[in-house]
Image (cartoon, rainbow, N blue to C red):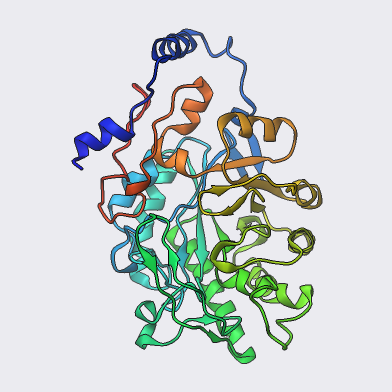
Amino acid sequence: MTIKSFNQVSATPFSGHNTERQTERFDSARTMSAQQLPTPPLLTPYKMGRFDLSHRVVLAPLTRQRSYKNVPQPHAILYYSQRTSKGGLLITEATGVSDTAQGYPDTPGIWTKEQVDAWKPIVDAVHAKGGILFCQIWHVGRVSNTGFQPNGQAPISSTDKPLTPQLRSNGIDVAQFTPPRPLRTDEIPNIVNDFRLAARNAMEAGFDGVEIHGAHGYLLEQFMKDQVNDRTDQYGGSLENRCRFTLEIVEAIVNEIGADRVGIRLSPFATYSEAADSNPEALGKYMVEQLNNYGILYCHMVEPRMKTVGEMSECPHSLVPMRNLFKGTFIVAGGYTREDGNNAVAENRADLVAYGRWFLANPDLPKRFELDAPLNKYNRETFYVSDPVIGYSDYPFLEGTA
């Protein structure tokens, strides 16, 4: 598909029989002065620790697979700066803490000087537009294979239980996984140190903080969740033991860069990469209570309705118990619309709302939400292609807001 036809097909502002009515409503909203328009809850300011946010619409961390050879590329400067608004919070795509952390093609890292230097102009571009940028740091654990690992070694995990082959998020490719090797107890401090050094490197690159990726079936969840963790040492068995590794990482990073620059993402209810827990609410509550002891800046939690990527389901569970327990900023993510997000803030179920697919397809999403403007459609087929433009920086802005 050519770039031209891609824009025509997937980035059409609106379609259907009510186009005229939508256009009239949108045009009339734009002509009204700001004083006449009630401010939607998502567009109200918020103070997150040292950071003054002008609105509550967050760019969620989105794997884009365009960091060739694990080095961030110049085209990411445009991608992130497009999605920056003054006083807006952005979280980067998941960024590897070491050469063993990889499980996908062309995902960025932050363990080498070359990678740190490559991140600097990206961070500078976001700061130049008044944005706040956090680097999400991760280790995929068993969600990998020998092809991604140094010297073709086995991936590391909490367990030796392998993952079954899985359809990739693009719905086409099938991912193959190598049986993992369980980390020895004496090796765990080395991985904790990898996260600490990654956080230090993020500060050197100029980031405002880091988000620890403790969600979606990756290494930290492989320790936290009892359907994966079958250890018998001090990192397995009880809830306290299973959470120990993640909390050791939190503590190390807090000590390295300060609690006011640390966030974490958790998905206790999700079952990504066959990582489920028998009592997800207990896991979520325990984690936020422990996180309070470190005074970290924010907790970013995935809604229970998002069981896997793109799969939303009716669910009796809620993040409200965790929201009520956590003392810092609470960010929610997972299938939110403009209306859902406004309601979550208005009802005090969240301080901030993270948007992924809609922010990808609408680089000016906060402005569109402010005006209740039509949204570009996203094209799932181009989420993970390696092209530096298509499906990346070619989604159009509203007229006059670029």
| Rendered-image quadrant of the C terminus | top left
Asked where in the image residue 46 lies, by quadrant, the reply is top right
Q: Where does residue 158 sit, x and y in percent of width and height?
A: 61, 81
* Residue closest to the eye, 99 or 50: 99
Taking the image as shown, residue 127 lies to the left or right of residue 303, namely left
| Residue at horizontal 62 percent and vertical 46 percent from the top | 313
* Residue 360 falls left or right of residue 328: left
Kindly identify the residue that appears in the image at 40 percent across and 73 percent down.
Answer: 176
Residue drawn 80% across the image and 60% down it: 289
How many marks the image carries: the answer is 0
Q: Is residue 103 left or right of residue 299?
A: left
* x and y, in percent, of residue 103 in the image: 42, 71
Image: 84 above or below 158 = above
- From the top left corner, tell me how far across and down residue 91 is, in percent: 50, 51
Q: Residue at x 68, y 82 (%)?
A: 230
Q: Where is 184 relative to 67, above or below?
A: below
Looking at the image, is 124 positioned above or below residue 288? above
| Front residue of 21 and 197 | 21
